[in-house]
Image (tube, grey):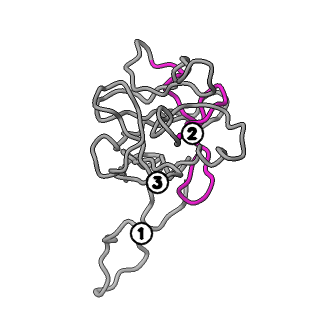
Amino acid sequence: MEIFQSANAVRLRSSHGKYLTAHDDEESVTQGRHGDAKAARWTVEVLPADYTNHNIIRLKSCYNKYLTADDQPFLFGMTGRKVTQTVPDRLDSSVEWEPFRDGKNQVKLRTRYGEFLRANRGLPPWRNSVTHDIPRRTATQDWIFWYVEVVETDMLKPEKNLILHSDSFSSSESSVPSTPSSLSGPEV
């Protein structure tokens, strides 16, 4: 997905207006109001297209741990499984997320098993929790949408390199564009 292709780091804001946050216990993942906190910043790793041609990303917290779809239930007997931050022995599908665009900067992040990253709300213990699940109720359908705020970009990533064309020069114009929005070239 092109929004992640040139992003080095992002913040993910839930439909509840809170940010996906790596808790300082270096294991839990919650939602927090402070998007400018370092714990709300996630480093993006874009994997090469796999044999199914899916766009897969990994998100790494400020504690250098991956956003992980755990198999354990969030609450015994309830729907929704834990989302944690881990450093697995080997990088497997539990740390891989497939983004689906739904709007300009709005995405759904799906695990390899078809469940979506979900921002919960309500009374404790659900308040500010993050799980992965398949939404089954109309009331919670929007809880799987995340707004992507790009914090840091890398214009040199090969997927988004833009070719600058300069057929003519004039003394009143700079030969090198000053802002990324003035770049032109084929979209990849």
For badge 1, the amino acid type reads: Ser
Task: Please name the residue shown 47% across and 46% down the image.
Answer: 5
Vertical order, 94 against 43 (above or below): above
Q: CA distance from mark 3 to mark 2?
A: 17 Å
Q: Describe the element under mark 2 as helix, strand or loop.
A: strand
Task: Please name the residue shown 64% across and 44% down the image.
Answer: 140
Q: Earlier in the sequence, mark 1 or mark 3?
A: 3
As for residue 62 lying within the magenta part, the answer is no
Local crowd size for mark 3, using a 10 Å CA cut-off: few (<14), some (14–19), many (≥20): some
For badge 2, the amino acid type reads: Leu
**Front of the two marks 1 and 2:** 2
Task: Please name the residue shown 44% across and 30% down the image.
Answer: 67
Q: Describe the element under mark 3 as helix, strand or loop.
A: loop
Q: Residue furthest top?
A: 89
The residue beneath circle 2 is 109
Checking the image for residue 17, the label placed there is 3
Checking the image for residue 181, the label placed there is 1
Q: How many marks?
A: 3
Give the magenta-colored segment's residue range.
91-120
The percent coordinates of residue 144 (x first, y second) are 59, 43
For badge 3, the amino acid type reads: Gly
Q: Is residue 38 left or right of residue 147?
A: left
Task: Please name the residue shown 57% across and 18% down the image.
Answer: 76
Q: Residue furthest bottom?
A: 172
Picture quadrant where residue 31 is located: top left
As for residue 104 lying within the magenta part, the answer is yes
Local crowd size for mark 1, using a 10 Å CA cut-off: few (<14), some (14–19), many (≥20): few
The one of 161 and 4 positioned closer to us in this rendering: 4
The percent coordinates of residue 103 (x first, y second) are 61, 58
CB of mark 1 within 8 Å of CB of mark 2?
no
Q: CA distance from mark 1 to mark 2?
A: 27 Å
